[in-house]
Image (tube, rainbow, N blue to C red):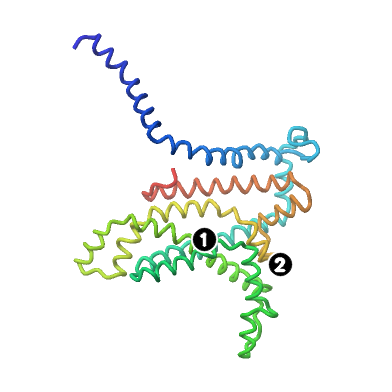
């Protein structure tokens, strides 16, 4: 083969690769078009607002804006770290999220395993529907239901207890009881939706594996332990990493609606504290500094959890 032929072949490689990519794009251009909306969503609502993080380093004024406000460096962070209440809300956020991780995270796994063992199709579908419906109910409505159920005076549960001679239990005013109600409500609201994810993962398990262990005499529990759980292990690890990353992030509606002044020492979390400092007290710089601190700690948790997962041989998030 002469040098001219070799040179021409080398030049033709990039052209063929480019043509192949163009062919792929023409074939699946609808999918690329569908990506435009989610990409725009993340740019507009996730990346552009990062510009506002500069407020954490300013003495922000709504009249002067971000560009006109005075820069104060880390003064806002020094101020929030000097607040005793700040450490209380951080503690409450970590404790409530850690307890949620213990109780709420395993619940959908257990439900998915139980539903997967059901053989009556109509009952299985009905159970799935009833379990994930609470996910679509607003926390405002759930908060109203909780008060109707567990109020000390007039609550359904305490009325039933009183009818059999048992004294009323302060579910919503005693700190320990409030935490139990808070956790139980969270499990009820989120478990069904998480179950859908694990049921989808269960469909990817090879059915021949179950047939093979049945030949060896394995029962339902052994099949669940040796095939089903290992089959969804990667999904469990990924969702666990995401959950750990959110351990410093807590929704606003749930603690705000269910909390009250009598359980403030346990119910006041970062999101409600930012609302009170930022909106009610108009201290926007302090509220932004707290939010930025919260985001950085969450990033550390995600990266750490991902590294630990990879150490144990899992794929992780990246």
Q: Position of residue 275 (x, y in %)?
A: 71, 53
Residue shown at 65% from the left, 63% from the top: 140
Q: Which residue is mark 1?
A: 101
Secondary structure of the residue carrying tag 2 is loop
Judge whether 80 appears above or below 71 on screen: below
Q: Is residue 261 depicted above or below 81 in this figure?
A: below
Front: mark 1 or 2: 2
Quickly name the residue at label 2.
260
- Residue at image position (28%, 12%) is 7
The label shown at residue 251 is none
Q: Nearer the viewer, residue 67 or 57?
A: 67
Give the position of the N terminus as an image quadrant: top left
Quadrant of the image occupied by residue 204: bottom left
In this rendered view, identify the residue nearer to me: 172 or 20.
Answer: 20
Name the one closer to the observer, 124 or 87: 124
Residue at image location 73% in from the left, 67% down from the top: 261
Question: Quarter of the image containing the C terminus?
Answer: top left
């Amino acid at each position: 083969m002469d040098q001219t032929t070799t040179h021409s072949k080398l030049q033709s490689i990039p052209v063929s690769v480019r043509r192949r990519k163009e062919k792929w794009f023409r074939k699946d251009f609808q999918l690329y078009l569908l990506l435009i909306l989610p990409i725009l969503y993340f740019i507009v609502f996730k990346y552009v607002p990062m510009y506002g993080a500069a407020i954490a380093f300013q003495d922000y004024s709504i009249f002067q804006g971000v560009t006109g406000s005075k820069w104060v460096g880390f003064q806002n962070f020094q101020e929030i770290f000097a607040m005793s209440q700040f450490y209380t809300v951080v503690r409450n956020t970590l404790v409530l999220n850690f307890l949620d991780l213990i109780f709420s995270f395993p619940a959908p796994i257990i439900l998915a395993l139980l539903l997967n063992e059901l053989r009556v199709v109509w009952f299985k579908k009905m159970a799935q529907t009833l379990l994930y419906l609470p996910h679509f109910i607003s926390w405002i409505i759930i908060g109203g239901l909780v008060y109707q159920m567990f109020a000390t005076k007039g609550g359904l549960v305490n009325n039933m207890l009183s009818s059999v001679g048992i004294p009323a239990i302060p579910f919503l005013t005693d700190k320990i009881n409030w935490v139990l109600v808070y956790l139980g409500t969270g499990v009820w609201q989120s478990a069904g939706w998480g179950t859908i994810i694990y049921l989808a993962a269960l469909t990817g398990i090879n059915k021949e594996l179950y047939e093979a262990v049945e030949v060896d005499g394995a029962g339902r529990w052994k099949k669940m332990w040796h095939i089903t759980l290992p089959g969804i292990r990667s999904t469990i690890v990924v969702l666990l990493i995401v959950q750990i990353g959110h351990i410093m992030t807590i929704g606003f509606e749930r603690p705000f609606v269910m909390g009250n002044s009598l359980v403030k020492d346990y119910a006041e979390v970062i999101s409600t504290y930012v609302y009170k400092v930022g909106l009610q007290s108009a201290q926007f710089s302090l509220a932004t500094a707290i939010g930025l601190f919260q985001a950085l700690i969450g990033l550390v948790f995600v990266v750490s959890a991902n590294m630990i997962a990879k150490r144990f041989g899992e794929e992780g998030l990246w």
